[in-house]
């Protein structure tokens, strides 16, 4: 009986890390207006494997995340559906330029811009990777606000007020 108890204990011990592991799916963005005040500049950090999955699902075939023209084009098209601004009058402002990508083992940074009218009240729709993982949360820090005013986006609340206009 002692030997059986030891085997069960070891099996539970070996299996415990996987059972206790809780994957965390989150993104973080920093947002700031350019010097002319007509373009929102965005730095967005995501999990590379989640972005790769989103692009693969969207395309219908395997996409390997790499900084090349094809993946940049796919990424910009994905962002245009999942990270955008809305005005009160219903105008939609989408990412227009992907300035760069940094792809690492544990994070991918995407740098892009959204041309928008700062005279308008704007809300941010941030549903990045919520199509991949239902528990995805996205944080966005408008650099003109205090750090404590970071916005939190969830599947239940993917859009929030961002800019009150000039």
Image (cartoon, rainbow, N blue to C red):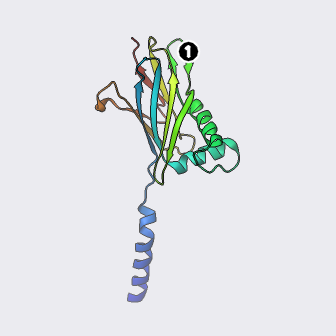
- Percent from the top left, x then y, of residue 40? 46, 24
Relative to 68, is 6 above or below?
below
Residue 105 in sight here: yes
- Percent from the top left, x then y, of residue 146? 29, 28
Q: Residue furthest right?
A: 60
| Residue drawn where x is 49% and y is 48% of the image | 47
SS label for mark 1: loop
Looking at the image, residue 150 sits to the left or right of residue 124; the answer is left
- Percent from the top left, x then y, of residue 147? 30, 32
Relative to 78, is 61 above or below?
below
Dot 1: within a 10 Å radius of its alpha carbon, few (fewer than 14), some, or many (20 or more) residues? few
The quadrant in which the C terminus is found is top left
Looking at the image, residue 8 sits to the left or right of residue 55; the answer is left
Relative to 96, is 132 above or below?
below
| Residue drawn where x is 32% and y is 29% of the image | 149
- Taking depth in this image into account, of 160 and 31 the one nearest to the observer is 31
- Percent from the top left, x then y, of residue 91? 56, 15
State how many labels appear: 1
Residue 1 in sight here: no
Q: Could you say which quadrant of the image residue 137 lies in?
A: top left
- Which residue position holds label 1? 90
- Taking depth in this image into account, of 17 and 69 the one nearest to the observer is 69
| Residue drawn where x is 56% and y is 19% of the image | 92
Q: Could you say which quadrant of the image residue 70 lies in?
A: top right
- Taking depth in this image into account, of 144 and 162 the one nearest to the observer is 144
- Taking depth in this image into account, of 83 and 117 the one nearest to the observer is 117
Looking at the image, residue 120 sits to the left or right of residue 81; the answer is left
| Residue drawn where x is 39% and y is 78% of the image | 9
């Amino acid at each position: 009986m002692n030997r059986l108890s030891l085997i069960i204990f070891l099996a539970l011990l070996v299996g415990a890390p996987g059972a206790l592991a809780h994957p965390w799916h989150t993104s973080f963005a920093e947002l700031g207006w350019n010097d002319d005040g007509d373009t929102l500049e965005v730095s967005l950090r995501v999990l590379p494997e989640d972005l790769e999955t989103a692009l693969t699902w969207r395309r219908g075939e395997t996409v390997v995340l790499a900084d090349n023209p094809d993946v940049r084009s796919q990424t910009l098209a994905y962002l245009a559906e999942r990270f955008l601004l809305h005005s009160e009058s219903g105008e939609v402002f989408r990412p227009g330029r992907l300035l760069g990508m940094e792809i690492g083992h544990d994070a991918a940074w995407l740098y892009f811009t959204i041309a928008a009218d700062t005279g308008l009240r704007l809300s941010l729709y941030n549903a990045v990777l919520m199509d991949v993982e239902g528990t995805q949360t996205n944080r966005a820090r408008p650099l003109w606000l205090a750090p404590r005013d970071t916005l939190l986006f969830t599947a239940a609340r993917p859009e929030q007020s961002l800019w009150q206009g000039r």
